[in-house]
Amino acid sequence: MTPATAPTVFVVDDDDLVRASIQGMLKSVGLRSETFGTAQEFLRSKRSDGPSCLVLDIRLPGVNGLDFQHQLVDAGIRIPVIFITGHGDIPMTVKAMKSGAVEFLTKPFRDQDLLDAINQALDRDRYANSRANWECCGSATSCSPHASARSWVWWFRACSISR
């Protein structure tokens, strides 16, 4: 995979140690990551076209993570979100999940729980991106992917759905 298409995990947390810990864990399993101390830093960053997800703290300086998730959607930035927090409760969890979060983890969480959520989020983003790359013209013989075909099954599904 080229750096532009390699999966990237973005981490937004105001705690330096949390960011460094998550980044080290991701590096140990071969995942590329970029970390940010604020939501604004993340917004100013250049993001690749490859699959990605966002590990987002609930309590951030200047903006609540749940509000930031809504700002991303309003800005047309579609990225799967995994919330992490040391201050979660059931209503907050429900609100995050209803807003489309992949997972809501309470600190301290197990590394494997975060990795499972990240893999699920990256799969979700791959699927969303592959769906956006299909151009179907109504018949299986004239349907073709824009980018490289990840799977002929996806090709068939995309063509079948368009009919």
Image (cartoon, rainbow, N blue to C red):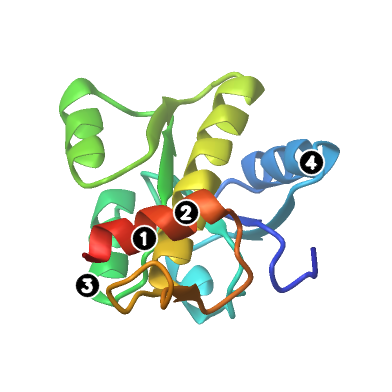
Q: Which residue is labeled 1 in the image?
A: 158
Residue at the image position 40 percent from the left and 63 percent from the top: 131
Q: Which one is in front in this view, the residue at disc 3 or the one at disc 2?
A: 2
Please tell me whether mark 3 or mark 4 is closer to you in this view.
Answer: 3
The CA span between labels 2 and 1 is: 6 Å
Q: Is residue 79 above or below residue 82?
A: below
Asked if the residue at tag 4 contacts the one at tag 2, i.e. Cβ–Cβ closer than 8 Å, the answer is no
- Residue 152, x across and y down, in percent: 55, 55
Q: Earlier in the sequence, mark 3 or mark 2?
A: 3
The CA distance from mark 1 to mark 4 is 38 Å
Tags 2 and 1 touching, CB below 8 Å: yes
Residue 36 lies, in percent from the top left, at 59, 61
x, y percent for residue 101: 32, 42
Question: In this figure, which residue is indicated by the disc labeled 4?
Answer: 24
Element type where label 3 sits in the image: helix
Mark identifier at residue 74? 3
**Regarding mark 2 in the picture, which secondary structure is present there?**
helix
Categorize mark 1 by other alpha carbons within 10 Å: few (<14), some (14-19), many (20+).
many
